[in-house]
Image (cartoon, grey):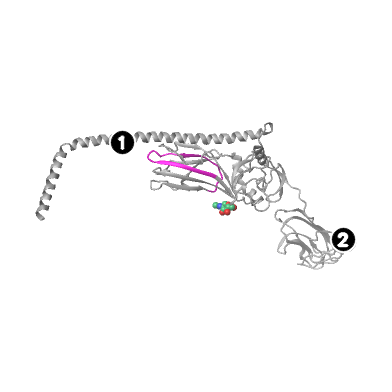
Amino acid sequence: MAYYSAVIQVCFFLLAYYICLTAGTDLEGRFLQFEKNFVNVKEALEAKVVTLETKVARLEAKVEQQESQIAALILKEREKDQSSSTKKFTMSVELNQNYKRNAIFRTCQELRSSNPLLESGMYWIDPDGQGVGDDAIHVFCDMKSGKTLIGHDSESKIDVGKCAEPGCYSRKINYYATDRQIESLIGLSNNCSQRILINCNNAPLNVGGVEYSWYNTKSKKSDGKQTFSDWLTNCDSSRTQDTGRLVNYQQILNRLNFGGTLKGSLQHTLGKIECEGKAKNEGMPKSCEDLWRMGHTLNGIFAVKGSKSIESLYCDFNRRPNENGFEKRIGYADVKSDPVHFYVQRNSSFNTKYTPIPFHFARVNEGNAMNLTSGEFTAPRPGTYFFSFSGIAEYSHLHKNQVFMYIGLFLNGVVRIGGDFTEEGSSYYHSNKRGPLSFQSTLNLDNGDKVWLQIYASSNDVYLLEDRENHFSHFTGFMLEENIVASL
Ligand SMILES: *[C@@H]1O[C@H](CO)[C@@H](O)[C@H](O)[C@H]1NC(C)=O
């Protein structure tokens, strides 16, 4: 057995050797043939790639064309609607027109609040207000979340194609709503956002600090150029898909720009503008914009809370809040507050020091802010108050020494606002010496501030002169102007 297997092995060896020898002679020829074939196949494949690329480009052009046709149709529809009164429409169109004309709700959120049973779908809304500004818009309402979604002509996945330079691909985004309506919706919503998905292969958005890709927003001040880096990572070679959401959405994204796709590829898918919630509008309106957010749409003069008083504004809601003439300040509103005034007198002379001077009766005490017994006036509301005092000091018949009396107006017992005094030198004349006392004061007072009169220095035998018939002392005060805002 061992002998036969050895023979077979030798035979196989010889056979292989023979094949190798004969093959060796035309190996070179075969290789050349193979190389030729390879070149043919390569050329054929390349030709196919070119054909495919052309086809893709054509398809993309078609998609783009169709999208702009859709946009044009929507615009046409809108124009048609404007001249609707002269044309006849079918029942369904008329119904649609009614919905459109009667679009009283400004956001899907409002629509949902009005009827929680509504299903998600297309609805007419009028963010800038019914009857003013632009026509109503047709939007998608997500009734689960109350989101308002505004679409555009570039929502499908779109290939950027081959282009080397930064921003050599540039595409305008046309929304199915006017800028005014979109801006109004943004103003009425708690927050808006827009999602972007980038499929990419070896097409970084930023190379060594140079932005190859960016987007533009509608902005009057700057060119509105914004980089993606805040919300997308760099779409580098290790990454094939990147998705981000443009949040804190204040300005409309209206153009996408890409570049640096020569070695790789990039496709963008831009979502709808999504607006959610209700803009916070706390407390009383302070501006025409606040009024507009609250739902006012009819032009007119309004009272709003100013920094120190109630103010009158003229609001032109045909304009946008950022346009000139939207808000015109007219002046203070004439708001009447509860009156406060007093005029009090005494029946008898008084000479107690360091204590509020009490009074016996009031000619007027509207608002009861003056307490006769304690002599204290308490400001019932913040504002500007006026006080006036006048009286006479009487000295005793005989005084050998110098005599005097100081009277002051005190605020909260701590602050002496001011005073007046009368004084006589020593005298041997047998007659009374008298001196007038008077002062006026205008004060800004807070709620609860106390004001009174007080003798804060006097010699012996000096009186604030008074009798029942003549009434020599007069203390009067009133509120000149209430600080309405501080008391709200
Ligand atoms: C956007 O608004 C909605 C509704 O008010 C709220 O639930 C959500 O948290 C907000 N999102 C952001 C990112 O502020």
Q: What residue is drawn where x is 56% and y is 36%?
A: 71
Residue 209 in sight in this render: no
Circle 2: is it few (<14), some (14-19), or many (20+) Cα within 10 Å? some
Q: How many marks?
A: 2
Percent position of residue 253, x then y = 53, 42
Is 129 left, or right, of 15 in this rendering?
A: right
Is 341 left, or right, of 147 in this rendering?
A: right
Q: What residue is drawn where x is 43% and y is 35%?
A: 57
Percent position of residue 396, x then y = 84, 66
Q: Vertically, is 230 above or below 258?
A: below
Residue 313 picture quarter? top right
Q: Quarter of the image containing the N terminus?
A: bottom left
Percent position of residue 195, x then y = 51, 46
Q: Quarter of the image containing the C terminus?
A: bottom right
Which of 392/387 is in front?
Answer: 387
Amino acid bearing label 2: His
Is 428 left, or right, of 272 in this rendering?
A: right
Q: Label 2 belongs to which residue?
A: 471
Q: Is residue 156 magenta?
A: no
Which of 407/66 is in front?
Answer: 66
Q: Label 1 belongs to which residue?
A: 42
Task: Tell me the magenta residue range.
Answer: 247-272
